[in-house]
Amino acid sequence: TKMTREEVFNRLTKVFQDVFDDEEICLTDNTVSSDIEDWDSLNHINLVVSVEKEFGIKFSMGETQKMKNVGEMVSIIQERI
């Protein structure tokens, strides 16, 4: 069965909170890297790896570059799981 967007968001939020060590993070479709203080290029790699582990998927380079906001990340995850 497909995971709902809400389920993906809930799991993704936990990953973000772990990677950025910030329990206050609340994601929306429009969340972008500039919204999260420590989201730099290095942490982006950590984030992608953590998301891949959480959902048991691998993103292609193209997908990683296409993720301009959290909503796009959720859509790609939903397609892949």
Image (tube, rainbow, N blue to C red):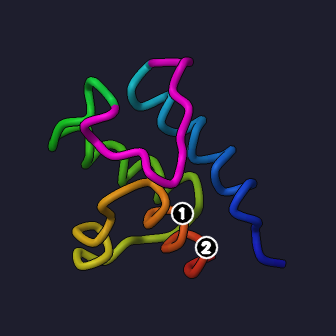
Q: In the picture provided, is 14 more to the left or to the right than 22?
A: right
Residue 43, placed above or below residue 6: above
Density class for disc 2 (Cα within 10 Å; few <14, some 14-19, many ≥20) is some
Q: Main secondary structure of the magenta part?
A: loop
- Magenta residue span: 22-35
In percent of the image, x 22 and y 68: which residue is there?
A: 65
Density class for disc 1 (Cα within 10 Å; few <14, some 14-19, many ≥20) is many
Task: Give the quadrant of residue 36.
Answer: top left
Residue indicated by mark 1: 74
Q: In the picture provided, is 22 more to the left or to the right than 35?
A: right
Task: Give the quadrant of residue 80.
Answer: bottom right
Q: Is residue 65 magenta?
A: no
In percent of the image, x 57 and y 52: which residue is there?
A: 54
Q: In the picture provided, is 25 more to the left or to the right than 59?
A: right
Q: Amino acid at mark 1?
A: Val
User: What numbered label is drawn on residue 58?
Assistant: none
Disc 1 to disc 2, C-alpha distance = 6 Å
Task: Give the quadrant of residue 10.
Answer: top right
Q: In the picture provided, is 67 more to the left or to the right than 76?
A: left
Q: What kind of element bears circle 2?
A: helix
Residue indicated by mark 2: 78
Badge 1 vs badge 2, beta-carbon distance below 8 Å: yes
- Residue 72 pos. (x, y %): 44, 66
Residue positioned most to the front:
30
Which residue is at the front of the view, 38 or 71?
A: 71
Q: Amino acid at mark 2?
A: Gln
Q: Is residue 26 magenta?
A: yes
Q: What kind of element bears circle 1?
A: helix
